[in-house]
Image (cartoon, rainbow, N blue to C red):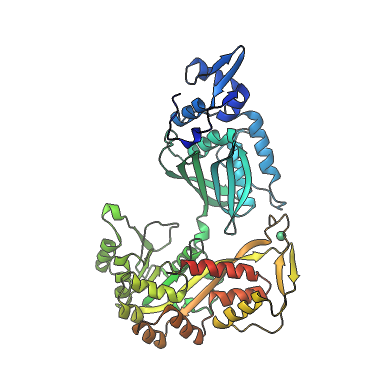
């Protein structure tokens, strides 16, 4: 036995596989197996005319040889393509994505079918993970749709190695490297729009796992109207001021990057000098100079921001306001005639102000420099295909809770209303939801908030003051959307719970 004793996968691995089982396990064709046997790449046992293979030997081979298993069995490939095509919803527009040159019936066509399905389902990312349950190995395909991870299929393990190689090749990753994480991208066109499939590979106990994020470059730069920021929205006057500090908060995947980029796209004109300082940049914003920070290279937020004083900026965007050096610099820039937009992770608008102080900004400076804070999140919309009214007694605990949350958040619920839900249908994959709406909580900074901040008021106090001055919280906005029949109370409570978890 040459197997690696630290590999838990081998505990139950000393099993003999037949030739057919071996072909499926390795994901190769019969001629390839014979070639490997002849070359001594793998060893088999022969009982009469029957070949048997030790599973542990095969696993050791898979772990050793990164280029093993390049050709997938034709029947498996054909069955997989058929299954993926059958999972397509009855969308009126047929998928027309392209991954290089696809030979019909090839493993590339399997990848192409996965991408087609992801686009048809409006998924934001594709997850492929090798999993082992009892005696069964699978390559688990899931997609995140409207923020929810949904199981799509269990792809036969025999396709794992070849599918991974195909994706890694398309993303320009090192095919021979399977022991360290890698990242790359695949340009992709769908419905006349350009996308990038950001591919990340990760070695796991049972093999390499792959996550693909679907990113549309153009989507990052939208008109503010398109993302629900009307001309009357307070954010419009905030970004219209020549100086001050605007904070943007919201959980990952809440669309806040899109909001910020769309703001910058609107205010960065050739007459103003605009810098963006961030760790990554998802889109090229016209009329801005992008600085990418890299702590390891000695170009962290501190040195980058210090040098900017010499470059006479008008507008600054800071990618992470929670880094101490950035937190300290934000109010200083804002109080000296610069318009500063910054991202900060916090559970609500009020929490963002307090968090900035906790991260190292001076309390007084924060109180004096703020113009406004926008906190946002996305709530799932009820599927219009299977929407139905639900009756709920006024004394139902959910309604009592909703009434309280709404009132505290600045919105009085009407006496009479109808709530809806999605029953679940093919169009929404039985989730009852399809698409999402953005909810924005806009905290306009005021003299009372300056004073409250200076006496170190709590997050709750700050929120109460803002609500008394007209702010509507995300919770209350969500309940308003539920009453309008766009979403459900359950969804609003889920969104609020995940926000309060993000609160520090
Ligand atoms: Zn539905």
Q: Residue at x 53, y 59 (%)?
A: 219
Q: Residue at x 69, y 46 (%)?
A: 87
Query: Observer-nearest residue: 474 or 459?
Result: 459
Left or right relative to 411: residue 82:
right
Q: Position of residue 166 (x, y in %)?
A: 53, 36
- Is residue 443 shown above or below 468? above
Q: Position of residue 268 (x, y in %)?
A: 41, 68
Query: Observer-nearest residue: 119 or 151?
Result: 151
Q: Quadrant of ligand 1?
A: bottom right
- Is residue 250 shown above or below 293? below
Seen from this angle, which residue lies furthest top? 48
Q: The N terminus appears in which quarter of the rendering?
A: top left
Query: Observer-nearest residue: 176 or 47?
Result: 47
Q: How many marks?
A: 0
Q: The C terminus appears in which quarter of the rendering?
A: bottom left
Residue 340 occupies which quadrant of the picture?
Answer: bottom left
Res. 120 in view: yes
Left or right relative to 251: residue 387:
right
Res. 241 in view: no
Residue 105 occupies which quadrant of the picture?
Answer: top right
Q: Position of residue 403 (x, y in %)?
A: 62, 80
Q: Residue at x 58, y 76 (%)?
A: 477
Query: Observer-nearest residue: 260 or 21?
Result: 21
Q: Position of residue 253 (x, y in %)?
A: 51, 61
């Amino acid at each position: 036995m040459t197997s690696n004793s630290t590999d838990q996968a081998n505990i139950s691995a000393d099993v003999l596989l037949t030739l057919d089982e071996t072909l499926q396990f390795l994901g190769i064709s019969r001629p390839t197996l014979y070639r490997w046997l002849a070359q001594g790449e793998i060893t088999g046992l022969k009982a009469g005319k029957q070949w048997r293979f030790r599973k542990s030997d095969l696993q050791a081979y898979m772990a050793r040889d990164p280029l093993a298993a390049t050709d997938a069995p034709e029947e498996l490939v054909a069955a997989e393509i058929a299954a993926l095509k059958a999972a397509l919803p009855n969308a009126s527009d047929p998928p027309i994505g392209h991954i290089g040159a696809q030979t019909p019936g090839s493993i590339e066509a399997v990848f192409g079918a996965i991408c087609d399905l992801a686009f048809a389902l409006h998924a934001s990312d594709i997850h492929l993970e090798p999993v082992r349950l009892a005696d069964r190995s699978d390559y688990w395909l899931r997609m995140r749709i409207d923020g929810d991870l949904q199981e799509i299929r269990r792809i036969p393990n025999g396709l794992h190695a070849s599918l991974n190689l195909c994706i890694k090749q398309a993303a320009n990753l090192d095919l021979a490297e399977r022991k360290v994480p890698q990242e790359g991208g695949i340009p992709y066109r769908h419905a006349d729009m350009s996308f990038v499939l950001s591919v990340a590979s990760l070695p796991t106990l049972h093999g390499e796992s792959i996550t693909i994020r679907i990113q549309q470059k153009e989507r990052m730069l939208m008109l503010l109207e398109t993302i629900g920021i009307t001309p009357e929205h307070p954010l419009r006057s905030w970004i219209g001021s020549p100086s001050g500090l605007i904070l943007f908060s919201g959980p990952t995947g809440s669309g806040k990057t899109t909001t910020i980029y769309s703001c910058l796209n609107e205010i960065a004109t050739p007459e103003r000098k605009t810098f963006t300082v961030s760790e990554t940049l998802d889109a090229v914003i016209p009329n801005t100079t992008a600085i990418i920070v890299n702590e390891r290279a000695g170009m962290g937020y501190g040195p980058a921001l210090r040098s900017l004083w010499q470059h006479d900026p008008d507008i600054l965007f800071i990618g992470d306001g929670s880094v101490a050096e950035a937190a300290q610099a934000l109010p200083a820039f804002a109080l000296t005639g610069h318009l500063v937009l910054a991202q900060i992770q916090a559970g609500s608008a009020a929490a963002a102000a307090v968090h900035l102080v906790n991260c190292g900004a001076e309390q007084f400076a924060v109180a004096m420099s703020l113009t406004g804070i926008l906190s946002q999140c996305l709530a799932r919309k009820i599927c219009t295909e299977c929407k139905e009214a639900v009756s709920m007694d006024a004394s139902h605990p959910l309604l009592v809770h909703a009434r309280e949350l709404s009132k505290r958040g600045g919105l009085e619920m009407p006496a009479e209303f109808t709530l809806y839900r999605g029953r679940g249908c093919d169009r929404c994959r039985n989730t009852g939801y399809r698409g999402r709406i953005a909810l924005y909580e806009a905290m306009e900074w005021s003299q009372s908030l300056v004073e409250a901040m200076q006496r170190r008021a709590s997050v709750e106090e700050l929120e109460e003051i803002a609500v008394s001055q007209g702010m509507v919280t995300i919770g209350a906005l969500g309940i308003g959307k539920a009453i309008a029949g766009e979403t459900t109370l359950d969804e609003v409570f889920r969104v609020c719970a995940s926000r309060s978890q993000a609160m520090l």
